[in-house]
């Protein structure tokens, strides 16, 4: 079980085991099948090839698929690495059985937390996720917004932070309980902590614009919240 937040680890683990057991019962072979190449392959933006038209994806495969969905505002980082995708769980549908008395399959419940409330990118993010699922043939899913607890930069993964640096953005220094001071902010290009703040707002409201006093390059700093 992979879970985005360690805070919810225990409850999420128990829920996930149950949902995985349900999936294994309903799809005894497919649920444990690795993604196999077949006709009509989908190439994701990051070069992965995923096709779920003929079988139920595993939870891990869905995490990998969503890890190919770039954040609209910071395309170098995926919605998974930015911490927007909170959980993916298989849930049996409420009816349990279809009209013929056959057990009806369940659906994947995908919980996402917008980075900032009222952020115009939220709807775009949801559409991007929906598009990736549909292109890969994932049929039964529901996306729900989870507004509490609210998103924090603490949820950006280490891989996400590294990708921010490569993209020329200094990742948040410190954490939400103890945001870093200016000296903790490192220039993403040369690593120097000698810099000056040019503007409280960079390319987006969640970033501030700095200029490095060693390599002279301006850079965005992803504010710690
Ligand atoms: Zn520098």
Image (cartoon, helix red, strand yellow):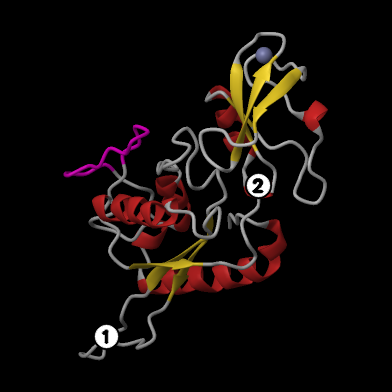
Numbered disc 2: secondary structure: helix
Q: Which residue is mark 1?
A: 102
Secondary structure of the magenta portion, mostly?
loop
Task: Give the mark nearest the N terminus, 2 or 1.
Answer: 1
Q: Residues within 10 Å of mark 2 (few under 14, many from 20)?
A: many
Q: Is residue 47 left or right of residue 212?
A: left
Q: Pointer 2: what residue?
A: 153
Question: What residue is drawn where x is 75% and y is 49%?
Answer: 176
Closest to the observer, 80 or 12: 80
**Figure disc tally:** 2
Q: Quadrant of the N terminus?
A: bottom right
- Which residue is at a point 26% across and 55% down the rendered structure image? 134
Magenta-highlighted residues: 37-49
Q: Residue at x 70, y 67 (%)?
A: 10
Residue at horizontal 45 percent and vertical 40 percent from the top: 73
Quadrant in the picture for residue 190: top right
Height in image: 62 above or below 181?
Answer: below
Residue at the outermost top position: 215
Disc assigned to residue 73: none
Most distant residue in the left direction: 39
Residue 201 appears at what percent x and percent y?
59, 36
Magenta stretch contains residue 39 = yes
Q: Position of residue 37 (x, y in %)?
A: 26, 41
Is 137 situated left or right of 4 in this image? Answer: left
In the rendered image, residue 181, in percent from the top left (x then y), is placed at 82, 34
To which quarter of the image does residue 211 belong? top right
């Amino acid at each position: 079980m992979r879970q985005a937040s360690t805070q919810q680890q225990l409850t999420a683990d128990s829920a996930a085991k149950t949902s995985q057991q349900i999936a294994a019962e309903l799809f005894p072979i497919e649920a444990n099948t690795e993604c196999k190449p077949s006709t009509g392959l989908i190439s994701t933006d990051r070069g992965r090839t995923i096709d779920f038209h003929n079988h139920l994806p595993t939870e891990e495969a869905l995490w990998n698929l969503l890890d190919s969905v770039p954040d609209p505002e910071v395309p170098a980082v995926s919605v998974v690495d930015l911490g927007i995708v909170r959980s993916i769980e298989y849930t049996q549908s409420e009816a349990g059985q279809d009209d013929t008395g056959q057990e009806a399959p369940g659906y994947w419940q995908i919980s996402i937390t917008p980075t900032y409330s009222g952020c115009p990118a939220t709807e775009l993010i949801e559409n991007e996720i929906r598009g990736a699922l549909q292109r890969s043939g994932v049929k039964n899913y529901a996306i729900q917004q989870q507004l509490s607890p609210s998103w924090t930069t603490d949820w950006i993964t280490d891989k996400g932070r590294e990708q921010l640096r490569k993209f020329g953005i200094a990742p948040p220094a410190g954490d939400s309980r103890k945001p870093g001071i200016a000296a903790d902010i490192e220039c993403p290009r040369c690593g120097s902590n000698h810099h000056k703040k040019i503007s409280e707002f960079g390319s987006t409201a969640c970033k501030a614009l700095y200029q490095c006093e060693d390599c002279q390059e301006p850079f965005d700093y992803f504010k710690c919240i």
